[in-house]
Amino acid sequence: WFCILGGILVSIAGCLLSPLILTAMNTPSEVIPDAALYLRVYFLGALFNILYNMGACTLQATGDTKHPLYYLCLSSVVNVVLDILFVTVFHMAVLGVALATLIAQLVSAVCVLWKLTHTDDIYRLVPSQIRSDQAMLVKILKFGIPTGLQTAITSLSNVIVQSYLNGFGSLAMAGSNIYGKVDSFALLPANCLSLTTTTYIAQNMGARKFDRVKKGFKSFLWLGNLYAVVMGILLCFFSAGPLRLFTSDPEVVHFGAMMGQVLGPGYILLITCQILIGTARGAGDTFSTMLLSILNLCGLRILWLTIMIPLFPSIYTLYLGYPVTWGTAAVCMGIYYRKKIKPRLGLS
């Protein structure tokens, strides 16, 4: 009930405020009409995006981590395929990209809701029973608000980064945004691994199986770091190939590949940080992880841009803000994990 209400409100607000948001972000005037069109169509899918996340987290909390990954991979493939189809075949330009994203969000939401309505388990979703439960909603918000604030404020910092990026021109914007699509797809397994860490740690903490906690944490860290190294190398040196699926403009590809060269080596820091955050959340600590994430991924990132861009006015400086703040976040989370979380998990 809460997700449906929130999704509708976000969609309405996003559609109405898109031009104002773009203006506040210093978006070049020549791209505002297309950007506003994209944002409005994208915001129409906010409800689908929120419902998918609700359903995926429900499945993960019950130990089903496979189906959310399958649905997310499917929606990502649908998004990429439709991007290519709508843009290169039907020549729908920005509208095609926006519709591809909207349809992909719909696919992921339909898949996860179908799973929830067709299970025989206790968490089965019965549409006719969807209603507000004040006591339960308060409990959910108690644990959900810190994580939600962390995500919202981190997203706000990305908006601020985008406003700085817009100052480097439309080609830099296009290259960076296209790389963002490649980046999102590449990091899907890492994001799912972080969510799985939370579920796994919480389940075994509740069962008092600390030996499994220790083995699981080490396995998550090892798998995450291995994936980060492989994917970081691929995107650092070979990101131009995937980028050419979206554009033939060499300048746009250049800016996107440049972003991959800077961000790729930093993926090991990001994924390590995500696994540590997932572990802390699994141990029941959502407030401290929120504060540390906001401090590094929002506060320090904005501080980096404010100080370093005027001193070194290069797009490299902007890109470097990501791995630098991933590194500080990983260090802070590592210290917090060692001092507070590790003893609670019974790890030596």
Image (cartoon, rainbow, N blue to C red):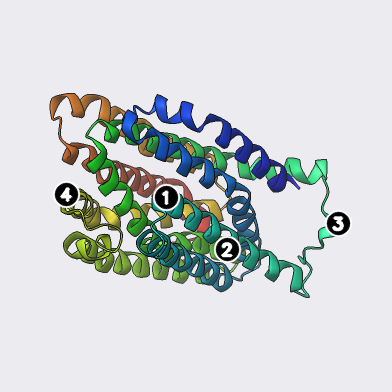
Looking at the image, which residue is at 55% across and 59% down? 103
The answer for how far apart the CA atoms under marks 1 and 4 are is 43 Å
* Residue 77 visible in rendering: yes
The tag earlier along the polypeptide, 3 or 4, is 3
- Where is residue 204? Give x, y as percent: 59, 66
Residue position marked by numbered label 4 in the rendering? 251
- Where is residue 43? Give x, y as percent: 55, 43
Closer to the camera: disc 1 or disc 4? 4
Can you say whether 262 is above or below 64 in the image? Answer: above
Closer to the camera: disc 1 or disc 3? 3
Dots 1 and 3: beta carbons under 8 Å? no
User: Which residue is the extreme one toward the bottom?
Assistant: 120
User: Which residue is the extreme one toward the front?
Assistant: 90
Residue position marked by numbered label 1 in the rendering? 337
- Mark 4 surroundings within 10 Å by alpha-carbon count, few (fewer than 14), some (14 through 19), many (20 or more): some
The tag earlier along the polypeptide, 2 or 4, is 2
Query: Residue 108 has which mark?
Result: 2
Q: Viewer-proximal residue, 80 or 303?
A: 80
Dots 1 and 4: beta carbons under 8 Å? no
Query: Residue 129 has which mark?
Result: 3
